Image: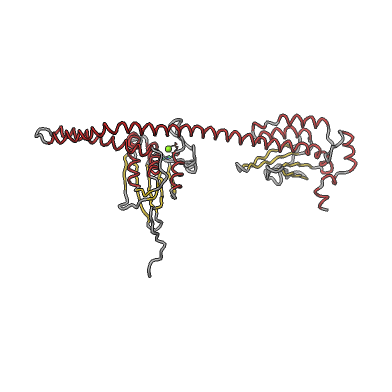
Amino acid sequence: MSQEKTDRTTERPGAEVSDLRELGPAASGTRAPIDPRALDRLYQLAIELPVDEGAARVVQVFLDGVAPLLPQLALGVCVVDPAQGEQLVELRLPDGALAGTGHDPSRLFPGMAHEEITHLSEGLTGSTFHVGSDDTTRANVLTEPVLSRALPLLEAGIKRARALERKAQSAAALKRLQAQVIQTEKLASLGQIVAGVVHELNNPLTSIVAYADYLKRRLEARDDGADDVERARRIGEAAQRILRFSRDLVAYARPTADVPAPVQLHEVIDRALVFCEHELERSGARVERRWHADLPCVLGIGGQLAQVFVNLFTNASHAMAGRGGQLVIESAFDPDTGRVSITVDDDGAGIDPAHLDQIFEPFFTTKTEGRGTGLGLSIVRDIVTAHGGRVTATSTLDVGTTFVVELPVAAHRGSARPPRA
Ligand SMILES: Nc1ncnc2c1ncn2[C@@H]1O[C@H](COP(=O)(O)OP(=O)(O)O)[C@@H](O)[C@H]1O
Ligand SMILES: [Mg+2]
């Protein structure tokens, strides 16, 4: 019984099969005979399928080519793209058909008496081909020879279109990656140059600091030198500042050691703020630190953690540009979880809710060419995750954005021990 149902050839009325045999060339193997004109059309279709224009176009052109060969039938293709989670339904109805159509892949032609559904081959899971008709007696006989030859065309066409799409995507990703590598190389060599420049600056700066101090003391010994003492003090202070900045710059640019050590986050943040001072000043933002009085150290790589905050502060100053905003950096420690958290809050432009999910993705940027690479936050997340922590963002458009970086402390005895009764 069941075999009769699945084997379509057994359903054919014998007379009609022999009629068709007379029409076309002898069937090879199990294939049913086909009208030579239909065969020509299918060959042509195989060549014409626009595989470089995507799977959707392949389906359209396929149906446009096959529909005239089966004029009395309704045809439909439902293609599921698991990568995109999309479903494409394309239909062709016979001329003058009044049959209603649907988008339910289990019944595309609910208005017709019969609908035969064929599942497309491996690799196209969930995709189906539909033939609707009001006359079953002849349907199989007429469709089988065409479809048995046409369906492999459709399957191959869709697969080829998808393969080409994937190839184009990976080519684009490769290009982006190459650009990133070039940028990274550039930064690495810049790091070396900076180290060299700072080395050269160190000796003259140390001299300036020392002689400014010497002059200051000489001037202090004079009664009339108060103004000059102040000038000498300023020279010394300015030189100290350059010295500090250049040393920090080297520490930041130097490839970071892989060995984690206890790091005091307040120091790291202060260093990051020095780097961003220029950027923050340009945006007219004030900076407020709300430090936890006794913040424990975290175990980590100082240079990398500084990079986390440099990226967050840079983004905040971009968002606050021209608004004269306020950047509030707050530290906290939760003894229960053994985690330190740093909250970076700006009252800048905020993030569109539609973008919030994407901001940590590599290459996601809303900044115009040249200003943003879209890599900052993905680096932030990578570094924080590698430190056993996590970073989250909340934002309100036109109000501001808050990033919270949580990191485990270096040595936490844990509070899991039950309190004594
Ligand atoms: N503090 C912030 N305020 C508003 N938008 C932000 C903020 N931080 C990040 N963003 C948004 O997230 C995007 C991605 O940030 P990021 O990964 O650092 O890349 P980039 O800064 O190069 O654009 C930014 O383009 C911006 O749209
Ligand atoms: Mg950025």
29 left or right, relative to 55: right
Q: How is the image coloured?
A: secondary structure
Along the line of sight, the residue nearer the viewer: 70 or 267: 267
Let me know if residue 400 appears in the view.
Answer: no
Q: Residue at x 22, y 33 (%)?
A: 235
Q: Position of residue 374 (x, y in %)?
A: 46, 37
Along the line of sight, the residue nearer the viewer: 56 or 189: 189
Along the line of sight, the residue nearer the viewer: 396 or 275: 275
86 left or right, relative to 292: right
Q: Residue furthest left?
A: 223
Q: Position of residue 31 (x, y in %)?
A: 82, 39
**Quarter of the C terminus within the rendering:** bottom left
Q: Position of residue 86 (x, y in %)?
A: 62, 42
Q: Residue at x 86, y 33 (%)?
A: 25
Q: Position of residue 183 (x, y in %)?
A: 46, 32
- For residue 248, what is the image quadrant? top left
